Structure formats: C-alpha cells, structure tokens
Amino acid sequence: MPPKSANPSRSGAVFAYKGDRLKPLRAFCQVARLGSVSRAAEALFLSQPAVTLQLQALERDLGVRLLERSGRRLVPTREGEALYELARPLVEQFDGLTTAFRDQLRGMDAGELQIAAGTATILHLLPPIIAAYRMAQPEVRLHLHNVTGEGGLDLLRRDAVDLAVGSMLDVPGDLDYAPVYRFDPMLITPHGHPLAEKAELALEDLSPYGLILPPRRLTTYRLVDMVFHQHRVPYTVAMEVGGWEVIKRYVAMGLGISIVTAMCLDGADLAHLTARPLARWFPRRSYGVVMRKGKRPSPQARAFIELIKPDLFDAHGARRGAHSDR
C-alpha cells in the first residue's frame, strides 16, 4: 500500500500549486520589472490582492524573501535578482509561445523545396538565385543537395528532390532538361606556362601536357574525350579529381592543365591562372533545370524556376521541345 501522507490536504495543495507555478513567476517578474504590485496587476489584468497572494505563495514555496521596498518601489532582494534572471526568459518564452507556434505553422504551410546540384553550380551559378528566392519566399524551407550529375538524376527519379540544376549532354527519356545559361570552354594553365604564352593555340598543342579532369563518369570528362577523338588528337590525363576548386588549385601549383567552363572562373582565380578560350573546338556548356518528365512543379519549385527563367515550363510541368543542346 502507498504510504499515507501526514497531511493529505496540504500535499494536494502543494501539488496543485507546483502544477501552476507559471502564474506566480509571471507576477513576480512583472513586479520586479515595474516596481509596483498595482502596476503589475494592471499589466496582468488581475486584482492587486491576487498578485500579492501569488507573490506570497512563491516566497513560501522557495523559503526566501524575493522583494523588498526601496522608497516607493519594490525591488528584488539578492535572492529575487537570482530568480528574476532565471525566470524572466522562461516566462517570456512561454508568453510568446502562441506567436512562435503560429509562425512555425506558417512555415510548415509554406512547404519546402529540394534541389540537387553539383559543387560548381552551387558555388558559382546559384548564389544570386538562392538569395533572390530567400528574399521572395522566406518561409519556404530550402534544401540544397550537393551531388554529382548522376547522383542528382537518381534523387529526381526517387522523388527525393523537386528539381536539379546542372549540365547535361544526353537527356534520358524520363527527364526534361531546359538549358538556360551557356558558358565558354576555357583552357587554364599556371602563369608562365608555354600554352599561356603561345600566340595561336591549336588542339594539338595540348597533347604534350597532362590534363587534370573530373572523374571519368562525369560529363566534363566525357566531353573532353569526345572532342579529342573527333579531331583525332591524342591526349593524356595526368590526374582525375573531383571538384573544380581542387582542379584550379592543382593547375595553379603546376601539376597539369585543365579545360573548364567560364562559369567557375572569377577574378581571384585569374590572379593565379591564365585562362584562354577553346570555343573553336569545344562546344559551349549549357546549365539549366532538370525535372522528371510529366511531373507538375510544386508552387515552391515553380517560384524557383520563374527566377531562373520565366515560363520555362508550361502549365503541365514539361518544357516545350525539351532536348539537350549542351
């Protein structure tokens, strides 16, 4: 049998009080802030006796004096100051709970947007678009998945993302690709490299120098291989490494040369690298939006696409005449 309480009625009263400790804490914080029981009662829409009883109950429970008179004001004692520092943020958070909850619900109602893109796209192409989207749609939860091209297509097919942004050479039958941006191909070398100084470049001039390229499975490697084979020019790959930022760093160190898109070059890069156009041999690279064929864009995805290019997709979510043009 459970032990009997020495004073059941008092035990029940203490339990009830501790279950409703917020009210006396709120009353205490208001008195400590305003310096007056009457002004605290007005702020809380209570009577002065009710506030006084709550303060007395709180002092009894804690076993300390919390307030004392200083002239015409009530001020916290040393113990009251300690309690005020602890209780004030708790009371404010609780009092703001309804507003915070409604804001959270609005964010949930706004939905989310899942985007797949490669590192170069995230670093060099998307920042101004993302900034504009965040300003226009601040309540949408935005998720950027940093993946390779094939990884992005896999996420699209599993409906794990709403869209992908990147470059495509061949468009599978179950996907739509809408190219929007086009960038020139560029040869990058260290400053002082023989190819940096050569007046006229021929594709054959690249043959003696090892190329630093992304992994073989990626679009850039396939494009470089295709162009050299079409022109029957031999080439060598000195290194395969993922990420344009790493490739640019290794080229600047003199470990090889590379062929990149102008998209991933900025003024800081040109302080360490020489860039020369290769548009005579290599096609311009397109970057755009990839979606599952026949999938209607969500309102969040449509708002993002409209920032990239208005009316890119028709009302049914499919691009008109979608095909790859690199």
Image (cartoon, rainbow, N blue to C red):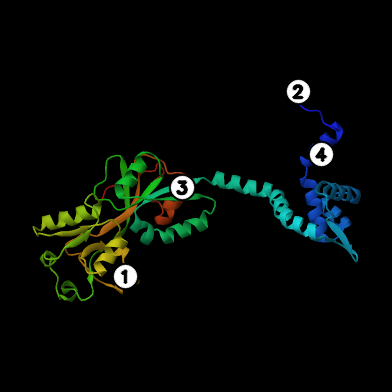
- Left or right of 279: which side holds 39? right
Residue ID at (78%, 50%): 25
Q: Secondary structure at mark 2?
A: loop
> Label 1 vs label 4: CA separation?
70 Å
Q: Residue furthest left?
A: 232
> Label 3 vs label 2: CA separation?
58 Å
Looking at the rendering, which quadrant does residue 194 occupy? bottom left
> Label 2 vs label 4: CA separation?
22 Å
Which quadrant, please, contains the C terminus? bottom left
Q: Select label 1 or label 4 by which is in front.
A: 4
Q: Select label 2 or label 4 by which is in front.
A: 2
Q: Residue furthest top?
A: 1
Numbered marks: total: 4
Type of the residue with mark 3: Leu
> Label 1 vs label 2: CA separation?
80 Å
Q: Select label 4 or label 3 by which is in front.
A: 4
- Left or right of 73: which side holds 106? left
Going from N to C along the chain, the mark reached first, 3 or 2, is 2
Q: Position of residue 108 (x, y in %)?
A: 56, 44
Type of the residue with mark 2: Met
